[in-house]
Each structure stands twice: as structure tokens, then as C-alpha cells.
Image (cartoon, grey):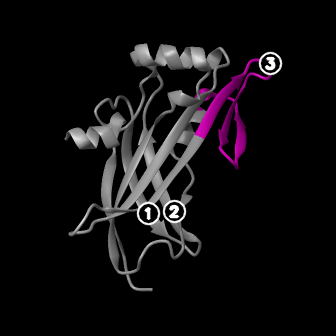
Amino acid sequence: MLTFALVHPAAHAAEGVEITQAHLEPTDEGYKLSATFAFDLNRGLEDAIARGIPLYFTTEVEITRPRWYWFDERAINASQTIRISYNVLTRQYRAAITGSLQQNFNSLEDALSLIRRPSRWLVAEKGSLKSDATYNVAVHMGLDVAQLPKPFQVNALNNSDWRLASDWKVFNFKIGFK
């Protein structure tokens, strides 16, 4: 249990986010993660956004292949970050997926829907996973306090309002012959 806590430090302090569904889908490009998260922002986080502080939500995926003779083989580590911010002048919320989509919303709830039901994203290129193998897939999502401005990072360490994360959801994924 101690080694799991060191590898996955957020596993013991998860609050507020539930992964309601997660699975991998094979596509022509590779394997895409489809996931749905359930959570509500507490008053402290809503106030932070309203004051112009962007919040960063990061989804992490680890794909490992169990081996009987040694430690599990780490096949894939992938992450995606979505930033939500509020523009006081335009009175709009902006959600941005790192490296791609940026979209404006009229309400915070609409912006949060992009985090709660993110579009499927490519976590493993075609051919990066061995055919006819079973993999363990672990998914985690939470507020990434490391990307906050420095004064808020210090506050986040001492304030439970800033701890918003899920437990690691682990499931098996079997790849058939190609």
C-alpha cells in the first residue's frame, strides 16, 4: 500500500471527482480514451474563477502490461490539461485544451461540461501496443495546482478547497490479433 501511495500520491487524498465511465476505443489512428467525470466546484474554486484565476484540470492515463517475471511494463503515459478561465470584460468563460481547442461559454456550467465529458483523445498511437495482449489502464483526473500562480500554489497546499481529484480508476483492456 505504501508503494502505491508513493507512485500515485493523489490516490489517498481524493475528494470530489468520480469517474463514472472510462474505456479505450480502438480507432484507425490508435486508441482513444472515452471518459466521463462527475464533480461540482466548491464555493472557493468558483470564487477563484470569478476573480480571474484560471483553473487547470489534468487527466492522466497510464497503460501497463502485466509481466509474471518482473515489474509491469509501462507502455504509455499520457495526459491532457483543460484550462478554464473567466474574462471579466466579456463576461465569458473560456475553456482551452492544451495544444488544440479553445471555446467560449456564457456560463461556468457550460465550460465545466468540457471537463466532465471531454472529447475522446488519442492516448496511444496505432502499433504502440502489442496485439493479443491484455493491458491495465489507470485513469485519474484532478485540479492541477502546480499550474496555478505561485501564491495560490502555497494556499492550495494548506486549503482543502483546492483539493479536487479522483481516485485512480483501473480497468483491463484486451487487444486482439490485427
Q: Single out the residue that lies furthest toward the front.
A: 70
Name the residue type under label 1. Answer: Leu
Name the residue type under label 2. Answer: Lys
Tag shown at residue 89: 3
Left or right: residue 2 versus residue 146 is: left
- Residue 51: x and y in percent read 65, 14
Work out whether residue 88 can be spotted. yes
Marks 2 & 1, CB-CB < 8 Å contact: yes
Which residue is pictured at 50% across the width and 15% down the height?
154
**In the image, is residue 139 above or below residue 154?**
below
* 2 or 1: tag closer to the N-terminus: 1
Mark 1: give few (<14), some (14-19) or many (20+) Cα within 10 Å: many
Residues under labels 3 and 2: Cα distance? Answer: 37 Å
Label 1: which residue?
24
* 3 or 1: tag closer to the N-terminus: 1
The quarter of the displayed image where residue 5 is located: top left
Name the residue type under label 3. Answer: Leu
What count of labels does the image hold? 3
**In the image, is residue 11 above or below residue 153?**
below
Label 2: which residue?
32
Which residue is pictured at 30% across the width and 62% down the height?
72
